[in-house]
Image: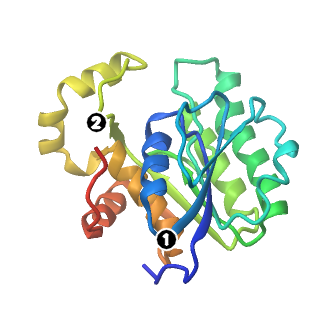
């Protein structure tokens, strides 16, 4: 990784009410290299912090109204997403592809030098040939970002994200994985990542403007976390 920017940076986070985005927000607010954090959310976070600016925006199909808010930002952490099976295929594609592309369009116009960190997923298929809709849509979003003109794009492809804190799991597969997590982690260490560790990696890469990437698979993320020395939050 490279040396951090000499001045405190301005960071924008999308999806801060979600699991990974929530940890990214908490970590960013404590990060000494970050001077301000703009959280763009569809519902209020219910917290206050000297560094935090909360912006309510409910329709990510059109982010034009965010142009002024996104002006002068140094980096964005984009964690907005949906679980397969929890929404219709049309909504899954809209959230995964359309919302990402629309937000990137406005950010690129308002802050052309910003870095962009995207929460993608293991198995994302940039060829569009996968039988899995999730993989195709993630790949499509990745392709759009890589072609968008940002000077730095970082794509994170975690495998199973361990929630750390108790939550209502979205489907049976996640309930099962949480139950067997200790064994699964031991047998397949490179197929799991803690939600807080993933968030830390996404923030650090944006802050440091890593020369690595642009794609970080689960193994890469785990190696990155091991190189960080800051204590976990919580």
Q: In which quarter of the image is the N terminus?
A: bottom left
The location of residue 145, given as percent across then percent down, is 69, 57
- Which quadrant of the figure has residue 108? bottom right
Camera-side residue of 139 and 178: 178
Relative side of 206 to 158, left or right:
right
In the depicted structure, whether residue 187 falls above or below residue 112:
above
Camera-side residue of 77 and 214: 77
- Label 2 CA crowd tier, 10 Å (few <14, some 14–19, many 20+): some
Q: Distance between the residues labelled 2 and 1?
A: 26 Å
- Label 1 CA crowd tier, 10 Å (few <14, some 14–19, many 20+): some
Q: Quadrant of the C terminus?
A: top left
Residue 96 visible from this viewpoint: yes
Kindly state the secondary structure of the residue where label 1 is placed.
loop
The location of residue 154, given as percent across then percent down, is 55, 63
Find residue 33 and name its label: 1
Q: Which residue is drawn at 52% across and 25% down?
A: 84
Relative side of 199 to 114, left or right:
left
Q: Residue at x 19, y 33 (%)?
A: 181
- Mark closer to the chain start, 2 or 1: 1
Relative side of 17 to 94, left or right:
left
Kindly state the secondary structure of the residue where label 2 is placed.
loop
Mark whose residue sits in front, 2 or 1 = 1
Find residue 164 and name its label: 2
* Snapshot colouring: rainbow
């Amino acid at each position: 990784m490279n040396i951090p920017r000499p001045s405190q940076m301005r960071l924008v986070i999308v999806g801060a009410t979600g699991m990974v985005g929530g940890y990214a927000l908490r970590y960013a607010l404590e990060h000494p290299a970050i001077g301000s954090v703009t959280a763009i959310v569809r519902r209020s976070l219910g917290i206050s912090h000297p560094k935090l600016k909360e912006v309510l925006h409910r329709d990510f199909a059109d982010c034009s109204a965010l142009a002024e808010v996104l002006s002068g930002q140094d980096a964005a952490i984009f964690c907005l997403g949906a679980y397969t099976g929890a929404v219709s295929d049309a909504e899954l594609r809209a959230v995964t592809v359309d919302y990402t592309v629309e937000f990137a369009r406005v950010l690129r116009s308002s802050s052309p030098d910003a870095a962009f960190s995207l929460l993608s997923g293991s198995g994302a298929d940039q060829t569009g040939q996968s039988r899995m809709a999730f993989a195709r849509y993630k790949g499509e979003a990745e392709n759009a970002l890589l072609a968008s003109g940002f000077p730095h794009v970082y794509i994170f492809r975690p495998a199973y994200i361990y929630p750390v804190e108790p939550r209502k799991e979205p489907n049976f597969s996640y309930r099962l994985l949480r139950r067997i997590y200790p064994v699964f982690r031991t047998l397949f260490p490179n197929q799991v990542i803690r939600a807080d560790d993933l968030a830390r990696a996404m923030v650090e890469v944006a802050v440091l403007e890593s020369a690595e990437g642009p794609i970080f698979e689960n193994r890469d993320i785990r190696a990155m976390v091991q190189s960080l020395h800051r204590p976990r939050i919580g």
